[in-house]
Amino acid sequence: MTVKKIAKKELARLLDEWSRQFSVLVPSVETGVAQMTGWQGEDTSFVDWYRNTILPPKDAILPVMEEMFSFSKNEDGYRLEMSPPDSGRQLIFGIRPCDARALAMLDVVFKQDYEDTYYMRRRLNTVLVGIGCTNPYDSCFCTSLSSGPSDTAGLDLMLTDIGDEFVIEAVTEAGRELLDKSQGMRPATADDEARARESRDIANQRVTQNVDVKKMPDRLLAAFDNEEYWRKIAAKCISCGICTLLCPTCYCFDINDEVSDNRGARYRSLDSCAFCIYTKMPVENPREEKWQRVRNRVCHKYEFYPRLFDTIACTGCGRCIRLCPVNWDITRTLNSIPGQ
Amino acid sequence: MEEKTEKLKNEARKLLEKGQVCRIVGFEPGSLKFTTTPLITGEKDELDRLVINPFIVNNLSVYLTGLKGCVAVVAKGCDSRSIVSLIQDNKVNREDVVILGIPCSGIVDLSKIEYLVGKDRDELDDITVANNSITVTVGGEKREFTKSKVLFDNCLGCELPTPREYDILIGEQVAPSPALESGKLKELKDMPPEERWRFWKEEFSRCIRCYACRNVCPACFCNRCFVEETEPQWLLPTPHWQDNLLFQVTRTIHVAGRCTECGECQRACPVGIPLRSMTREMYDLAGELFHYKAGMDKDEEPLLTAYEVEEAENFFG
Ligand code: SF4
Ligand code: SF4
Ligand code: SF4
Ligand code: SF4
């Protein structure tokens, strides 16, 4: 596919150009936490500081909270109104390879058996422009999961840092079209491509965490009833929602009505299997004890999901490790499952 | 530090061997550079992993209500106050816990170092802590900072660095630090109310209701938190900023007289909300209005469960 390049100092202009067709999201700390927010023009300094966001980009497609519809009651009866759809096209600029893969993992849930309009509407309107990582965290382990800091899977366009410039490569047809239409691009030379390859090799080597995921579903199945092991592993977890709510592949949600007087709205917001009140509302929580909930998080990602959908539901982004207040590290667990 | 660590290992081993406790709750090196992680173990051969260093962030007393006795716990000054507070509230029996007190010279706030040197934790080569200064090596270059620049805010004015309630003290007494008002709190107090309201609105707009602030907090020991009640439903789980703010304000009131200013809520918050400004204000108010300091004396009546008729009249006007 097409390979071009653009100078870093041209980036602002390119994002401006794309802003005419898309609402462009870029990494920023404007809200007080690193996340993807609307491009404001000019400031491309994220190119230097950005390694990955704290809030995963899934937020642009499956937000922490969204209004589904509103309702009201008057003399004539009830009125139901769909909340205005986000029909605009959006472009996420700078998404990391792990987070792009995560969206592909979420797709299975939201479109396979049942098509979730809220999710799909945004998903189909989203273009993903990735930047390969040059400076992975010590907690990244994407290379253990048949991916890596320069993986293009799930992206439309991929940028590789070669110093003062980015080499841009089209991954999908949509990406190619966008690239062809964009101004100010120059064709990448053989030398540029060689530098991009080198940059990718270096990045790959900088991912040092390692997990052996071979036969993971079987190994986890064999260890499933080993209560002693799970109790030990879970002891320090404090059952907060950080590792799930901020995981790019977690999708559990809760639905609540907010009603005042004769009107109200229905909201969906992220939920977490780590909470002891998870699913308490409709029935009971089948996982009353903490060790069962910790086991569920690991098994859901590494056993149930691969059995159902043929892919491990973890990208190795390492957010859960970096952000956990007690440093509960999933790689330590995966590397210590009994019977290995 | 090594000396203290060795002493701790010995004491912990003795406790387990004599059958005085079934479990030790301490710290071991974390999986990431410069981090530590809680170690909860009843196995003697794991005790060698125990460590004491200036990175032992967690307030381990949070585990006590779940472990239900027969345990020895490592506690810095503020943590020991949390244990005392739990004893006051009948959540922990004094006889059921062996307190391994650690006189504490302050814990390093890695996010402050990250900010000062403009690099992330994992990009730093080394951090050495001396008596009054901390040297950070990054990219082969050494940079020195005074301790007050890189310790957690709550360590700066710590009133009880050496536990008062303990069974075994690991190391020499440390004198209290001179009280320093936290910069953020002062800044907030100086703001006109509208501006302060806007500030908190913005801060709580990014709260994701992960409840890490509540779950790391030893003072939040309720089996069922008010936010989880459904009849009546005080608050919705939907993270609207108003509900988020209300959750935090209510939580702060619930921990009045229990919060020992350990700073865990703020440290745990993944989106960086300066929660300690709230708990600190509540802490100061408890002191000002009721001359009460949390977790100082296990025989004292807890602030929120004791009242006198005279004060009630004044209070409710
Ligand atoms: S593993 Fe860590 S982040 Fe996840 S629920 Fe437990 S304490 Fe919270
Ligand atoms: S489980 Fe952890 S490492 Fe895996 S995708 Fe989720 S946050 Fe990232
Ligand atoms: S916020 Fe209040 S109700 Fe909730 S756990 Fe803390 S003290 Fe209990
Ligand atoms: S830790 Fe922060 S984000 Fe999580 S519930 Fe508390 S205030 Fe909100």
Image (cartoon, rainbow, N blue to C red):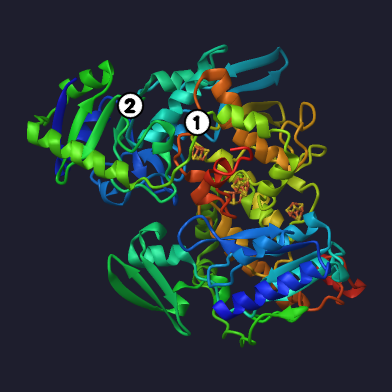
Q: Let me know if residue A84 appears in the view.
A: no
Determine the residue positioned at 21% across, 42% down: A199
Measure the alpha-carbon separation of dots 1 and 2.
Answer: 26 Å
In the image: residue B232, left or right of residue A98: right
Amino acid type of the residue that numbered disc 2 sits on in the rendered structure: Leu
Crowdedness of circle 1 by 10 Å Cα count: few (<14), some, many (20+)? Answer: few
Q: Is residue B240 left or right of residue A180?
A: right
Q: Is mark 2 within 8 Å of ligand 2?
A: no
Quadrant containing the C terminus of chain A is top right
The residue singled out by tag 2 in the image is A155
A209 vs B76, left or right, is: left
- Mark 1 = which residue? A214
Q: Chain of mark 2?
A: A
What kind of element bears circle 1? loop
Q: Is residue B195 above or below residue A40?
A: below
Q: Which residue is painted at 58% across and 50% down in the image?
A: A328
Marks 1, 2: nearer the viewer: 1
For label 2, the crowd category at 10 Å Cα-Cα, with few meaning under 14, some 14 to 19 and many 20 or more, is many
Q: Residue at x 51, y 61 (%)?
A: B35
Label 1 chain ID: A
